[in-house]
Structure formats: structure tokens, C-alpha cells
Image: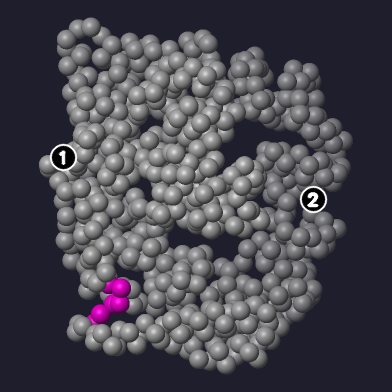
Amino acid sequence: MQPTRTALPYHSRTSLRGIGPQGVSIPHLQAILFAALLLLIIPRPASALAESEIDQRRHQLQQQRELYKQAHDALVQKKFKRATPLIQQLRSYPLYPYLLYQRHRLQLAKLNTRTLQQFKDNFADTPLPNKLHRAWLAHLGKRQQWPVLLNNYQPELANTSLRCQQLWALHQTGRSTEALQKVAPLWVQGRSQPKTCDRLFTAWLKSDTFTEQHAWDRFWLAMANNNPGLAKNISKRLQQPDRILTAKQALQLYSKPEQLTRLDPDAPNYQQLLQYSIKRLGRRDPAQALHQLQQFKDNLTMDPDQTQKLRHRFGLRLLRSYPESLDPLIQQINPSLDDKTLLEWQLRNLILTQDWQKIEHLIDQLPAPERFSGRWRYWKARSLETRSEPNPQERAQNIYAELANERNFYGFLSADKLGRGYSLNNQTELPDNLYLGQLSQSPAMLRARELLYQGQRSNARREWRLATRNLTSQQQHQAALLARQWGWYEQAIRSAITAKKWNDLMLRFPLAYSRDISNSAQSNKIDTSWIMAIARQESAFTPDARSPVGALGLMQLMPRTAKETAKKAKVRYRGSYQLTQPGLNVKLGSYYLASLSRRYAGHRVLASAAYNAGPGRVKGWLEQRKNIPIDIWIETIPFDETRNYVQNILSFSLIYSDMLGLPKQLLKPHERWATPPERL
């Protein structure tokens, strides 16, 4: 069923004093939406349920939730006799399959093909059968039950570890030739493979199937992957003297690529060493690499496209460092007009020196999509307004006026230029209660809701993806409203984005964990809207968020930073596992943010940049680029991630100020210049 659409148009063009007369405020809309969502607390069929029946269902659900916890805890403790009767009482509870899965995982030795197939048939609409199948195959390999493993192996379920187990099973059941012929693609990789592959690799390395070429190929893959330890180990399997010598030289050049000038052009594998060392040098000294690329142009056998790609790579690294002399560098790298990345970095170098005439000229040479983006239209206006003639000034004002209608960082900057209110362009739609009731009762959604209640967020996300994978855009939007009703903020945000409902600000920017954030803002004397913006940008309000580098929780704290901050804040802290608790994460994150605010004299731009990239980098950027207008400083931040981060934090803070009914300022007066802290 398609949801019906009821739109609440809202076009907020607000002054710094409050909401203009053209629309109702976002806080008022929140009250309307909250009242509408209350109707969906208990999904209703065509006829309304009697109040006593609603109470009865609530009581039954609460009982089931308590029984589930008891059964789950009994299984964790491996008290299967206690768990079994509890599980039997929960056949009608949405998470009944998860208890069976948990019991099977803890008793894999008792699992067999028939039981697994029965589980698959009964719960095919969940993510659990494949997880159980994968775990059982790994168990069979560990127990060396090779025939059973082979009979139940499915390639689509296999990761590298299981693939190795399957080939080893073939090897152990009289099919060694077939197995060993399939090992090379697993071994010839630029990274170490799982330990479960070791015995298979050992047998393969002793067989006639392995050749020196395999080792040679893997050596260079490891070097390209910046894994000299693996490469050194692989080099021990080389036999040809020239390859042994080349590998030794390559490992030396990894540490000292500048020694490429000592290479003998007549030596074996000279081209491979020369190309590798120039690429390696480009990571450490791009200026020298660019020079050597020119010096050795007659020696290199690379085709022109490869050479130009290297020029692009080295030139980009140099442009990000803002060299003192730009023109000679541009002549060296010779960027084409359709190379938007190099052109944009040329522009940033020109913006830093405020060479407005060249900026205006180069913007006109950008490819159309970039030329008409908010970013480069804004800088076009900035260049035009520096000219004294009336016509360019008028053109600049016209561009600012167009941009001021947009809800983005450059639109907000433009509104400030004109002294106008900000255009938030919010458009919120009320839920379709009938459709939402049906969606909330789908089996996957019921499981997602209960997993969320039980604190199993990863499993809840899997079920949500399963439930929403075939929804239309409008249905995704309604699903976002359902997630928001549950207090599942990150899923509401992601579903709104999937639905491309960019203008539904109440979904995309929820006032999540508002009590914790408000209390922390007051105690640390920083803006509530700023903390909201940081949490929204860092994790989209995902309590269990974990970054690739190990940052945790709503405000993405590194464990070491959290420990140091807890000591300063005199907060009891037992370990990083606590950082997934929203209250503690916000308390520590806000305290750390406040310390950065004090360090930079309340300058949110500098403090936000430091929160993302670290105070050390911000110190270096201020030493290189200080006492310049803040829009120039932000645009010339060398890291794309940090530049976008700072722009988002400022924009999100403004949006949250509107939601909280506070005055809105993209930049406070003392934030309009990039000034070192001691001079603020």
C-alpha cells in the first residue's frame, strides 16, 4: 500500500531575532508532529481497539520482554535446561528466532544438516539462517569434519577463511590436485591472510603448483600496499639472483626513496624499481618526486597517461601544502581544464593570496557542474565585489541573493553578506497513520523494534534493512517517521536521506538526547546547538557508532581522550565500553569540546576544526594562515574532511538554534577572522 501524502509547507526566512511571518516555527511543527505520532504508539486495525485490550497487549508485551531477557541470560550462562522452557513460552514473541539462533550457536556440535535446513525454512525472512550456516561451517572446519563441510559448503556464504577451509577439506579428502590449483588467488595478495589458511598455504608452497612468479607478484603487491614486513618475508621465496637483488633494493628504497638516483639503468628490473621509488618518493616529498619525474622522463617506459596521473598526484599533494610560488608548479603539472580537482586546488591557493582577478578567470574555466555549485558561485561573487565598477558589484549582489535562498553553508554566508535572514526551506510531512500501522506490524519491523528495545542495535539495523529494501521513496519517508517515533534517531536520519527528503529538517535534525546535551551545555557554558551539531555530524546520534580508527559513541571519542577527559572532569570511568552510553559520552565529549572552546577563546570554527583534526594540526594551519577572513581560512583547510566538517558544524548549529527557538548566527562577531588564540 502506498502512503498518502500530507505536506506541511514551511519556508523559514528568519532574521537573527526569530521566525519571520512567512511560516510557523519548527518547534511548533514538532508539537504538531509529536501529537500525530502519539496516535501510533499502538498500531490499530480498521476499528479502534478498546482501551482495556490495549492495556492487555501492553502488559503481554512487557511480560514477553522480561521473559526474553531471562532466556537470553540463561543461554549466555549456558544454562540450557533453564532456557528451554522460557524459550517455549516465547513462540509468539518477535525475537523467538533469535533465541533459537543463540542456542544453536552455543551448541554447534549438535547441529546437523536437517536441523539447519529446518531453521532456514522456518526463518527464511530473517538474516539469521546465513549467519548460522556460516558459523556451523567454521565449526566443522575447526573439528575437521571435512565430508560434512564439503556437503554443506555454499560459495556465496564464504569469506576468505571459509574458502581456505573448503579447499583444505578437498585436500584432506583425496582431491588435493583440485584444491591446490585454486590456492594462488588466495595467496597472491598484498596483505596477510587468516590463520585458517596457513596449513593450506604450507601444502601449496611445497607443491609443484607454486612458482617463483607467485612470490614475485605477491612481493610487489605487498610493497604497493605499504606492507614491507610481508614483502620481506615473501622475498625469502625468491630464487633468481636478479629478483633477490631487486627485492633487497626495493625494501631499501621504501625507507629511502630519494636514493633512486643511484640506480643502475643497466641493472635487471630497473624500470620496476625506478617507477616504484618515484611513487614512494611522492608520498614523502612530492616536490622532489615531481622533479625526478621530469629528470627521468626519457628513462621511464610509462605511457603518457600514467605519467600524467603521477604529475596529478604529486601536484595535488603540493597544492594542498600551499606552496609559496604557484605558477611554476602549475607549469610543471600542466592540468587539463576538465581536471576539476587540480583546478579547485589552484583556486584555493589563489583564494589564500586573494588574487581575485585570477580567481574570477579560473572559476569560469571549471567544468559546468562545479562552476554552478554553491561553493564556486560564492567565490565568484567574492571576487566580483572586490572590483570598483558598479556592474561587477551588482552582479555580486545578485549571486549572493540567489545563494541566500539555499540551505547550505554558502547560502548562509551569502545571507550574512546581504544582512538577510537565513532560508531553512523546511517542509515536513505528517505520517500516514494507516500505512504506518501496517508497516510497524510487518515481521521484520516487529523484530527490529524489539531488538532495539533489547539493546541489540546491530541486529536491529540488519532487520531494518531487510524490512525497507524494497520500499518506494515515499514509503521510506514514512519508515523514517516510524523510526523517529521509536526514538531511533540515526535510522530516522538515514531513511530520510534514502528517501531524499532533504527538506524534512525535523527528521534529519532531531533534538536527540536533548536532556543530556542541554545539561552538559549548561555545565560547560557552551551552546546546546553546537553540541547537537557535533553529535549529528559525528555519529548521526548512533550510540554504538565505532569509527575505523576506534572513536566511539555519539560524539566519537577516542578511548585515550575519554580517559584523560574523565580524569580532568572527575567523572568515574571504567573503560571504553562505557562510551556507548549516551549520557556519559555526551558528558565527556562536551567537556572536551568546552576545553577546546577555552583554548581558542570561544572561537567555534577553530575549536570544531581541532575536534576533528586535532589541536596540533590547527596550530600549524594558524601559523601558516592567520589573520585572514574566516571564510578564506575555512575554504583553504588542507583536509577535505575537516573543511566539510567545519562547514557542516556551523550550518547544523544554525539549524539547531532555529529548532531550539534561539537566535541564529552562522558566525559570531569574534569568529569572522582566523586569529591565533593569544590574539583573540
> Looking at the picture, does residue 439 appear above or below residue 47?
above
The residue lying at 30 percent from left, 84 percent from top is 54
The residue lying at 61 percent from left, 17 percent from top is 287
The magenta stretch spans residue 42: yes
Residue 301 locus on image (x, y percent): 64, 25
Q: Can residue 383 be seen in this view?
A: yes
Rendered image: mark on residue 40? none
> Which of 74/444 is in front?
74
The residue lying at 50 percent from left, 91 percent from top is 89
Residue 233: which quarter of the image? top right
Residue 57 locus on image (x, y percent): 35, 85
Residue 538 locus on image (x, y percent): 47, 46
Q: Magenta stretch?
A: 40-45
Q: Residue furthest left?
A: 21
Q: What element carries label 2?
A: loop
Rendered image: mark on residue 211? 2
Left or right: residue 136 compared with residue 129: right
Residue 130: which quarter of the image? bottom right
The residue lying at 67 percent from left, 85 percent from top is 79
The magenta stretch spans residue 256: no
> Looking at the picture, does residue 199 appear above or below residue 618?
below
Left or right: residue 250 compared with residue 595: right
Residue 484: which quarter of the image? bottom left
Which label sits in the foreground, 1 or 2? 1
> Which of 387/424 is in front?
424
Which quadrant would the N terminus be assigned to in this image?
bottom left
Question: What's the residue type where badge 2 is placed?
Answer: Thr
Question: What's the residue type where badge 1 is placed?
Answer: Gly
Give the spatial CA distance, label 1 vs label 2: 76 Å
Q: Do the residues labelled 1 and 2 touch (CB within 8 Å)?
A: no
Rendered image: mark on residue 20? 1
